[in-house]
Image (spheres, rainbow, N blue to C red):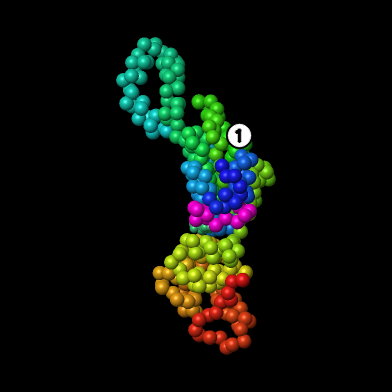
Amino acid sequence: MFATTTEVGEALGRQQYIATEEISTVLYLAEKLGKPVLAEGPAGVGKTELAKAWAAASCRELIRLQCYEGLDETKALYEWEYAKQMLYTQLLRDKLSQLLSDATSLTAAADRLASEDDVFFSERFLLPRPLLQAIMADKPVTLLIDEIDRADAEFEAFLLEVLSDFQVSVPELGTLRARHQPLVLLTSNNTRELSEALKRRCIYIFIDYPTAEAELRIVRLRVPELAPSLARQAVELVQRLRRLDLKKSPSVSETLDWARALVLLNAKALDPKTLDTTLSILLKHEADLQRARRGLSREERGRSDEPPSNEVRRLRPLR
Ligand SMILES: Nc1ncnc2c1ncn2[C@@H]1O[C@H](COP(=O)(O)OP(=O)(O)O)[C@@H](O)[C@H]1O
Ligand SMILES: [Mg+2]
């Protein structure tokens, strides 16, 4: 357990995660209060990565449940291994017929077989899915419930139950309780409203695009090969793009892809040609590309009285 919020931030930093003070505080409180964290925000701002870093920073295994439309209990909690049960009945055929040999009627045979149910509905044939894996784990784990907004509202209600007491009831086996309460992080890309009940249960945090300073630290950490001055210019440009009215703003993952591309292309500066040929790494809609090209050149003209230069496109330094 971390003793202070600063310790949390430092531990995340060692996992190459740049956390805001708000993030460190929320994780610190979640662990102390034993509450799940619900992290909401646009795609690509580091929500999934945060769960990985949190798990590694607290020396816990990460168990991940990826949500999608139609996700149900059998995929999230457990299912019986039907194929294995069938295989066992085939291999144990002789034993089973011995067992049933003295039964005089069909009902008697069925009763006899039913009394052996326990064999086939035991942990041996139980296939635990992520939620049950987290509950049954021998050691404390971190559970990531990723993109909960993609699952249906009914699944959200079911999840609430599991998160409220970390126990599940398997009719054939009884109630299974968590040996160690997992650290839980739910993420949402904000594609739909989540229920108030879920929000109430969790400590909520909105993770937005990082500030220029934080994004520069992320780029320097993740793409150290990129020259510092170029990294600064690249981040400044991405931040300017985010201020334009675009369909889809570039995310941190796109900034990193772009930074890697600049390294591969051996770019020395963000000259118009480099910018023009690589802008589609940041923006994935034709309308956004057009708008960005117009917006950037308008900004450039507004910023300088000099005639537009064909050479290096100057970018204002970060403040
Ligand atoms: N604060 C951060 N510190 C370090 N890397 C980050 C940070 N935020 C985002 N990243 C990088 O951005 C990438 C995309 O983040 P991801 O967790 O997949 O986003 P999300 O889950 O929000 O869609 C990660 O692989 C990571 O390299
Ligand atoms: Mg994600």
- Residue for point 45% across, 22% down: 118
Quarter placement of the N terminus: top right
Residue 190 shows in this picture: no
How many numbered circles are shown? 1
Q: Nearer the viewer, residue 303 or 254?
A: 303
Q: Classify 5 as above or below 170.
A: below
Where's residue 293, x and y in %?
A: 55, 76
Q: Nearer the viewer, residue 133 or 233?
A: 233
Query: Per the image, is 18 magenta?
Result: yes
In this figure, which residue is indicated by the disc labeled 1? 165
Determine whether, in the image, residue 270 is placed left or right of residue 195.
Answer: left
In the image, residue 277 sits, relative to residue 134, either above or below, namely below
Residue at image point 38% right, 32% down: 84
Q: Which residue shows up at 52% across the image and 54% down it?
A: 13
Residue located 50% across and 73% down the image = 229
Residue 157 x/y as whole percent: 62, 40
Location of residue 175 (image quadrant): top right
Q: Nearer the viewer, residue 69 or 257?
A: 257
102 vs 319, left or right, is: left
Q: Which residue type does callout 1 highlight?
A: Asp
Specify the segment rendered in magenta. Answer: 12-24
User: How far across and how far down the image is residue 259, in percent?
Assistant: 47, 67
Q: Nearer the viewer, residue 184 or 277?
A: 184
Q: Residues within 10 Å of mark 1 (few under 14, many from 20)?
A: few
User: Is disc 1 placed on a helix, strand or loop?
Assistant: helix
